[in-house]
Image (cartoon, grey):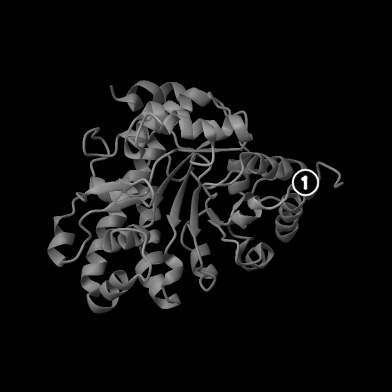
Amino acid sequence: MNLTEDVLPRTLQHRLENDLILRAARRQPVERTPVWIMRQAGRYLPEYQKVRTHVDFLTLCKTPELASEVTIQPVDRLGVDAAIIFSDILVVPEAMGMNLAVDESKGPFFQSPLRSSADIERLHLPNVESIHGGLRFVPDAISLTKRNLQGRVPVIGFAGSPWTLAVYMIEGQTPATFRASKELIYNRPIDAYRLLEKLSQSVALFLTAQIEAGADLVQIFDTWGGILSPVAFREFSLRFIRDVIQRVRESSKRGDETPIILFAKGVHHSFEEIANSGIDVFSVDWTIDLGHVRASIGSRIALQGNLDPMVLHTSPEVIVAEVEKVLRSFGKGSGHIFNLGHGILPDTPVEHAKLLVDAVKEESRIFHGTGVHS
């Protein structure tokens, strides 16, 4: 059964009970700052671990019913203001013809990394409509999650940026030195452009399918943008992110109304260019003051972030204090979505994640004129 065809017409009838994140993404007034957590559906939750005892990681990603179940778990447990669909950015290269495997101790990896022009030429655009060998399982999981949530919170879809996906495809796994990736862009830039162009088209197709399936927002993860020089970042990463955004806006029926978030780690040198890339929200890592970013570009786009994930391994008092610092850094007014500056760590205590969410809900009201700061 194609879940999208069966579920989508009904899911779109659900009015959102909580649309805070959508209003914040559009810099519209909110009663408090919305909050969600990158990687919130995952290993730190015992509910997730229970599901994983019966199924491997890729099967979980590719089974819409299970993916929907774990997507909703942090909404129930933490009370976050959005659900991000459970998946992995590397399903896109797999659907383009690469052999994806998972080492339970190290994570996903490619058994045969890209090494030649012929390897790049063999890649094909993914079939987003195919269940077998394609990417249909993600839009189907989004449609099912929309139905199961019944409008409680928005659903976020996502994909890796072309550059970040290229790094994994070239290196084969989480890299240590990025040598192979950098050798490609400097020694064989034509091959690099060809790969990134294919990925730009593929990511746009994937995000468009998620939006058409009912995703209320989408996020692009450019985890490795910061390993490039400023010039190389703009040439090999941001340029293709801009292409993705333009393709999504033009090809999706809901593209113009669906906020797009960009998480680009370590790119403090290119705020102006990022603000002009077509995104609605820039997700900031924890290594820069949020107020500084707001002063630079916050009048044009919304901001997301940026608590250091390690703060959740400290005491409750420190967590609340650090939450307050982030809120004060952004200051009064809308346009802020609270999040971590990177994904939540697997060994994070669940009660600390819940405390973070509760603290944002309580402490942020004063910044929107709807509460008294204690």
Numbered disc total? 1
Looking at the picture, does residue 18 appear above or below residue 119?
Answer: above
Give the secondary structure at mark 1.
helix
Question: Where in the figure is residue 192, as x and y percent of width and height?
Answer: 25, 68
Q: Nearer the viewer, residue 193 or 341?
A: 341
Q: Can you identify the residue that label 1 sits on?
A: 363
> Is 76 left or right of 145, judged from the image as shown?
right
Question: Where in the figure is residue 77, as x and y percent of width and height?
Answer: 60, 32
Badge 1 crowding class, 10 Å Cα cut-off, few under 14, some 14 to 19, many 20 or more, is: many
Q: Quadrant of residue 180 in the image?
A: bottom left
Question: Where in the figure is residue 141, as x and y percent of width and height?
Answer: 39, 31
Question: Where in the figure is residue 50, as x and y percent of width and height?
Answer: 47, 30
Q: Amino acid at mark 1?
A: Glu
Looking at the picture, does residue 265 appear above or below residue 42?
Answer: below
Which quarter shows the N terminus? top left
Q: Quadrant of residue 2 in the image?
A: top left
Looking at the picture, does residue 174 appear above or below residue 21?
Answer: below
Q: Nearer the viewer, residue 115 or 153?
A: 115
